[in-house]
Image: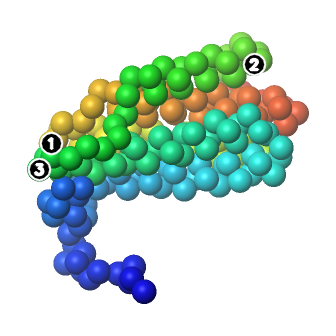
């Protein structure tokens, strides 16, 4: 049986795709690690949406989960990597925009900043959104040291918009009163 542990990271380094070893707190590792965290939060949201019979949301989030693995892999590429690997494509960003537009058709006009809460699904949408925003900041920090695709940055930016839209959509579908912050 293969072991899950290798001991190769015991001195605080990890390997990027392509073999280059970097510190575990390297901005690229911070970026793809935060995207990994987002993926775990999205998995929980997907499970709860399935329990609530929100099939459209489940299907959408299952696609996003796969796409986030592509984001992680692209962020984990070493400059020395010469092989082929899936990358974030412009049509992935466009698809998120289409999803946002489709979900928004049912929603009342935006009336101000939404206060999270009212149901665990709504709250988890907001947790996912905030982790996504943190991932975006980590990706931008990594981009200061290494090339990061504009499509990847656009994808994460649009994903946070989708997660916000899903919070509002869930509020409507679950029959929960939307709490809006008023100035």
Tell whether 3 sits left or right of 83.
Answer: right
Residue carrying label 1: 145
Name the residue at 31% across, 54% down. Answer: 30
Residue carrying label 2: 107
Q: Answer yes or no: do the residues labelled 1 and 2 have beta carbons within 8 Å?
A: no
Mark 1–mark 3 Cα distance, whole angstroms, equals 15 Å
Viewer-closest of 151 and 133: 151
Residue 158 on image: x %, y %: 48, 27
Label 3 CA crowd tier, 10 Å (few <14, some 14–19, many 20+): few
Residue 171 on image: x %, y %: 78, 33
Label 2 element class? loop
Residue 112 on image: x %, y %: 65, 20
Q: Which of label 1 and label 3 is nearer to you?
A: 3
Label 1 CA crowd tier, 10 Å (few <14, some 14–19, many 20+): few
Name the residue at 61% across, 53% down. Answer: 43
Residue carrying label 3: 80
User: Can residue 137 be seen by looking at this rendering?
Assistant: no
Label 2 CA crowd tier, 10 Å (few <14, some 14–19, many 20+): some
Which quarter of the rendering shows the C terminus? top right
Tell whether 59 sits left or right of 28.
Answer: right
What colour scheme does the image use? Answer: rainbow
Q: Is residue 132 above or below residue 111?
A: below
Name the residue at 37% across, 48% down. Answer: 72
Label 3 element class? loop
Q: Is residue 4 above or below residue 58?
A: below
Viewer-closest of 156 and 130: 156
Q: Give the mark nearest the N terminus, 2 or 3.
A: 3
Q: Give the mark nearest the N terminus, 1 or 2.
A: 2
């Amino acid at each position: 049986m293969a072991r899950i542990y290798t001991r190769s990271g015991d001195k605080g380094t990890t390997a990027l795709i392509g073999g280059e070893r970097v510190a575990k707190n390297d901005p690229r590792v911070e970026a793809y690690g935060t995207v990994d965290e987002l993926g775990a939060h999205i998995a929980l949201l997907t499970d709860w949406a399935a329990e609530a019979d929100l099939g459209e949301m489940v299907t959408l989030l299952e696609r996003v989960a796969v796409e986030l693995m592509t984001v992680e892999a692209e962020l984990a590429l070493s400059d020395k990597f010469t092989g082929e690997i899936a990358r974030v494509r412009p049509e992935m960003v466009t698809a998120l925009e289409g999803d946002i537009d489709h979900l928004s058709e049912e929603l009342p006009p935006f009336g101000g900043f939404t206060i999270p809460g009212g149901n665990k699904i709504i709250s988890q949408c907001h947790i996912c959104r905030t982790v996504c925003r943190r991932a975006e900041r980590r990706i931008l920090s990594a981009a200061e040291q290494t090339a990061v695709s504009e499509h990847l940055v656009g994808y994460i930016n649009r994903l946070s918009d989708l997660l916000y839209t899903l919070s509002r959509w869930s509020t409507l579908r679950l029959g929960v009163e939307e709490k809006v912050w008023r100035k």
